[in-house]
Image: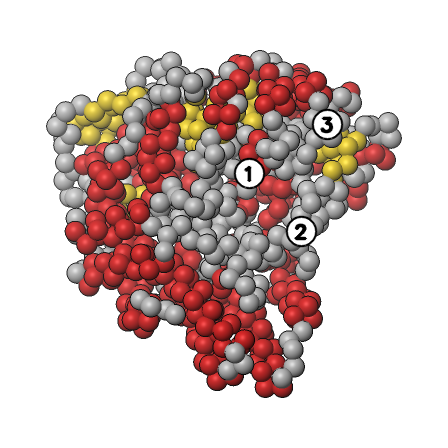
Amino acid sequence: MKILFPAKVRQHRYYIALFLSICFYTSAAAQLNKAEATALIKRIVPDKAAAFTVESLPPQADKDAFEIESNKGKIILRGNNGVAIAAALYHYLNEYTHNQITWNGTNLHLPDRLPAVPQKVQRKSPYQYRYYLNYCTFNYSMSWWNWERWEKEIDWMALHGINMPLAITGEEYTWYLVYKDLGFSDAELQDFFSGPAYFAWFWMGNLDGWGGPLPLSWMKSHHDLQVKILQRERALGMKPVLPAFTGHVPAAFKKKFPAAKLITTNWKNGFADTQILDAADPLFAILGKKFLEKQTQLFGTDHLYSADTFNENEPPSDDPAFLSGLSARVYEGMKQADTDAVWVMQGWLFYSDRKFWKAPQVEALLKAVPNDKMILLDLAAEIEPIWKRTDAFYGKPWIWNMLNNFGGNVNLFGRIEGAASGPALALNDTSSGNMAGIGLTMEAIEQNPVLYELMMEHTWQSQPIQLDNWLYKYIRNRYRSENPDLLKAWDILKHTVYNGQAIRDGAESIITGRPTFDSAAEWTRTRLNYPPKELLPAWDLFIKAAAAGVNTDGFRYDLVDISRQVLANYALPLQQRWVRAFREKDSAAFLLYSRRYLTLISDMDTLLATRRDFMLGPWIATARSWGNNTAEKALYERNARDLITLWGDANSPLHEYANRQWSGLLNDFYKPRWAQFFDMLQHSLQTGAIPDLPAFDKQIRSWEWQWVNRQKAFPVTAQGNSIQTARRLYNKYRPVMENPL
């Protein structure tokens, strides 16, 4: 008999638990897991968890429900699953204790005696699905997350009613095992798997190998992480969406299968061609089936599969018959492995390439799959609702999603009126067909928390949200204050940064752009949706509220963010001053304003260093933490640096797409870059020589690539006092902003 030592025993029990969870997840998801719901309450309000009692509601017909009432000194939370219980808890915290939990600031100051609920509260969601995440979120925000961070996010999801999360962590390990079963060597796969910061675009077939080679240790560790993620999500009653095969294969595939029909495609963003296996090739269904079988063996299934054909890659033909056949074969590949498979498709391609995807093409792609076997994600419905020009996706169930953030850029932005009314207006529109849910599909999280709190309020109501009333409660819960100055400030924010007019997504600051005389660049779009002067009174009012003693975590975050936005806006008129001075050959004025410009960058860096939310250090440190040796740590740091700067090599056309206004990045990347530009221009003024801008562009690309490949530790804990720093910068900059030119 083999003796198992304690560590081995624990591992043995872990795999038994995993096996049981995979075998029995279906029945578990259909009913309330009281132990998991109670554990969530203990994580959220550990000191008050004993005051809550969890009870089950009968299984609902695809629509979650909860109840809250007081009984014998206890707060009774009833729900049909863990998500409903979590939502009941959050409703109680919001409405009765005036608390709030966001990515950027949490207020959880409960009274010694929890208030009773005067009358039973009953809520039922009008939406079967509440979807969460975008492929891009897994990299722009989640690239380096460990289980501790994932656990917090899953709790956040449950509190906000999410029941249909995209779950693609660890997908690379599944594919590794599939290709190993097919006889591929590690050497043949080395140039296939991307680095960890680029998985989203690797999974979507846009690139191969960039940021690699990917260590096997990463694949194995993230297989284990995915197991934990799925166990928790399912235990709370969520139904995760797992990936399916869309045709992307290694370059070595042709060597292994010479007769395979491959389509060569290119994302057109500075990366090499990728190979897509033609859906008409018999190998497509075989490979798709093998992948889903292996994935189910590793992770189980809830029968929801994400698959996006030709994401930002144009199909080889616009013939409706071709597109219909392609779609049918993709679905058939899923069905062969899982007869209950439901295809979940992002509708992004219909937005990003609308010249190709006209009505006949969209209809052909969608109608080839049975209506009950496909769900469409209207991925950016707050920007352009695709359902309105596709006859509500031709009868398919579909989900209204808010995208809001692109690339993880740091800015105050959103369509707050649209978020308050859009989902309910669509739900009640007789032409909206089979609208089955709402969701959040931002490319990155941990910014503009008000938009996400507002959007998920729709989970439990079918009518538009009365925005002013909702904002009053949001302010009260976030700041523990009903300060009238904050009410006025938020009315200004509503009509400026959050008015959602004129521009698609939030503006960047010229500071984050590659040095230029222009007021904008391709991925440094500085056009605002409001006159910058109109934001200043909101800054005044927040500074005034700080002086009055408002000092919650959420307030400090918002004060820093508003101060950051005002300073970021001010960079543009300051740039115009040194540009004018240079063109007028005024060396003294150029020196004065270029120095002020660099000082502004440093001042912003100091401000942002007071909040961990705005720091480069944690991004780099968590990336390195996954490395098991020096080489792996260096690889992950290079991935982390590259994604938020060049997004590729030195000649990447995507540079600055994912720019961040972060402490550390401002002083170590953006400021030195501008300083080199100013040195060149100052030399030009002194010598009378015409500045060689093409030579500088070549030089700075080389410098940027060197920065990407450096290694350097940055602070991981906040430094300084947010309120004091914001006040100091307010006193310094506010007087010169009224008439900046």
Of 293 and 698, nearer the camera is 698
Secondary structure type for disc 1: loop
The relative height of residue 211 versus residue 245 in the rendered view (above or below) is below
Which residue corresponds to mark 2?
Answer: 211
* Kind of residue at badge 3: Ser
The relative height of residue 718 versus residue 220 in the rendered view (above or below) is below
Of 367 and 707, nearer the camera is 367
Residue 135 marker: 1
Residue drawn where x is 28% and y is 32% of the image: 465
Dot in front, 1 or 2: 1
Tell me if residue 509 can be seen. yes
Question: Of callouts 2 and 3, which one flags the residue occurring earlier in the amino acid sequence?
Answer: 2
Question: Of callouts 1 and 2, which one flags the residue occurring earlier in the amino acid sequence?
Answer: 1
Residue 317 marker: 3
Q: Position of residue 667 (x, y in %)?
A: 49, 69
* Kind of residue at badge 2: Gly
Q: How is the image coloured?
A: secondary structure
* Kind of residue at badge 1: Tyr
Tell me if residue 329 can be seen. no
